[in-house]
Amino acid sequence: MNLDPVTLAVVHNGLRAIASEMDLAHEKASFSPIIAESFDRANGIYHRDNGEVIAQGDRGLPTFVGVMQFTTEAVIERRRDIQPGDVVIVNDPYVGGTHLMDVKMVMPFYYHDRLWCYLTNSGHWPDTGGMVPGGFATNATEIEQEGLRLPPVKLYRQDQLDRDVLDIILSNIHVPGERIGDIEAQVGALRVGARQLTQMLDRYGAELVDAAVDELRDRSERLMRSHIEAIPDGTYSFESLMDNDGVDDKPLRVHLDLTVRGSDLIFDLSKSSPPCRGPLNSVWAITRSAIYIAMKHVFPEVPINSGCFRPLHIPKPTGTFLYAEYPRAVSGCAAEVSQRLIEVVFGALGQAIPDQIVAAPFSCSGNFSLGGYDPELERHYVMINFSGGGYGASIDTDGLSNAAASIGVSKSMPVEMIEERYPLLFEEYALRADSGGPGKRRGGFGVSYRARLLRGEGVASFLMEHGKYQPHGLAGAGGGVLNEVLIQRNGKTEQLELISKGSGIRLAPGDRVTVRTPGGGGFGDPRRRERELVARDLRRGYISLDSARRHYGWTD
């Protein structure tokens, strides 16, 4: 079928709009602030035959672009008994998942009694059980310690909720009341997508939309290949170190040999560290998805669908911590390992096309979880808070400050929302001065906050990175400042034993938590930065006088 450009554009934007409408419904109906306020969720449309992504909403978390494709593929393979009205729930990291808190739901969509596609979404539940509230047990050594693991099971059968499955889920988590609301929000978002798709197919016809999906996929592939062809052929290597795995205090090596061959890219990760004991092992779905996201950062104009991934070849890095197999603990893979994978892709491509690459971002979600009982509100709670940080600078611009993690569009939860729902008071929340890497174009700044527990006892956990190794700069610039986590209790200030990770830390009323996130790497020789830009940063308090003198040659 020949499609004119206008019709193709209408269908393309229509599919994206449907997925975005699903995102909005999911966001507005969710009970958990991490979904409703921080946007840690995504919705998409996936192919009926192989689960490949057709469209994802503009408001959805990018890290789920590839992941939900693999989730849908797993459901297609494992559930041969799918019928209209079924909804499958799954959070198994080894079956197209991430960590256990990212819960996926998959619903078949039928048009005139024919399976046309799958609608899939993912939402970060604040808790799925496990050793500590929030699921980020940094000392976990096997998946069973991290929470309830669900294979692809039917939560709804022909529009009827399976109460037995629901009871099993709610009996294994810390705050079941909130989860009921999150479940209904996810299912409701899928049904919004089904209504919108029905209207679209009624208007344009299933045959025309099918043809448009095929054409959009092929065009996306051609556009990605055209960008890759402009990169000089060769092999570019880059390596970055992660602080530790949360159990053993030794670094994990993420090593990439990136080969450019015509219009294809081969990502060889086989020289990375072997599997680790702690929860920093990365499941295959996350390892692939992180590389997809990195390429979308570099070439953002390529439309998201399965076509743009075809030129990207990723051999399975078996025998490394980037290919986790049962029963390895994995809670840190989605938030931390994925960002380090993006960082090494930037580092490798920075050798080939430096004018199109940014220096390393802060690459740390800054996960701070807190659970306990609030005696004033007479209820149990689980809070998860993540923080922004600095992005790396480019050849033309300074890095963004307090930006979202490189894997997503999730934002920090509003302080007012946290204080309303949880027994915390924020005593400081500010940009972190001097945290951006110095350069002709400096890195963006991280944030610094201090929160005090007001009442009741709490159990805190921290899963972060870049506490020992800086986000790198490019072209002679400096790296971003390291992450810091401090606990103030009993009149003493303590640092986490493993610097960026620790879990099961008991807090009493009056105890404080201080988190200072990394800045991004700089770009270019700092001594070439324009004097008026240094003066501006000094005037605004972004950098200290000592930093201006040491890095930029500032003289009064």
Image (tube, grey):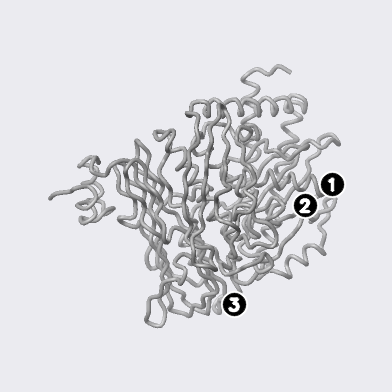
- At horizontal 19% and vertical 48% (from top left) the residue drawn is 553
Which of the 4 quarters of the picture holds residue 447? Answer: bottom left
Q: Which residue is mark 3?
A: 378
Dot 1 or dot 2, earlier in sequence: 1
Q: Considering depth in this image, is 206 or 220 the residue closer to the camera?
A: 220
Q: Mark 3 vs mark 1: which is more N-terminal?
A: 1
Q: Secondary structure at mark 3?
A: loop
Q: Amino acid at mark 3?
A: Glu
State the mark number for residue 82.
1
Q: Nearer the viewer, mark 3 or mark 1?
A: 1
Which residue is disc 2 drawn over?
88
Query: Real-space Cα distance between discs 3 and 1?
Result: 42 Å
Q: Is residue 224 above or below residue 269?
A: above
Mark 1–mark 2 distance (CA, rounded to whole Å): 9 Å
Q: Quadrant of the N terminus?
A: top right
Q: Are marks 1 and 2 in contact (CB under 8 Å)?
A: yes
Name the residue: 85% across, 50% down. Answer: 158
The quadrant holding residue 118 is: top right
Secondary element under disc 2, as helix, strand or loop, is strand
In this orientation, does residue 209 appear? Answer: yes
Label 1: state its secondary structure: loop
- Label 3 CA crowd tier, 10 Å (few <14, some 14–19, many 20+): few
- Verify CB contact (< 8 Å) between mark 3 and mark 1: no
Q: Residues within 10 Å of mark 2 (few under 14, many from 20)?
A: many
Q: How many marks?
A: 3
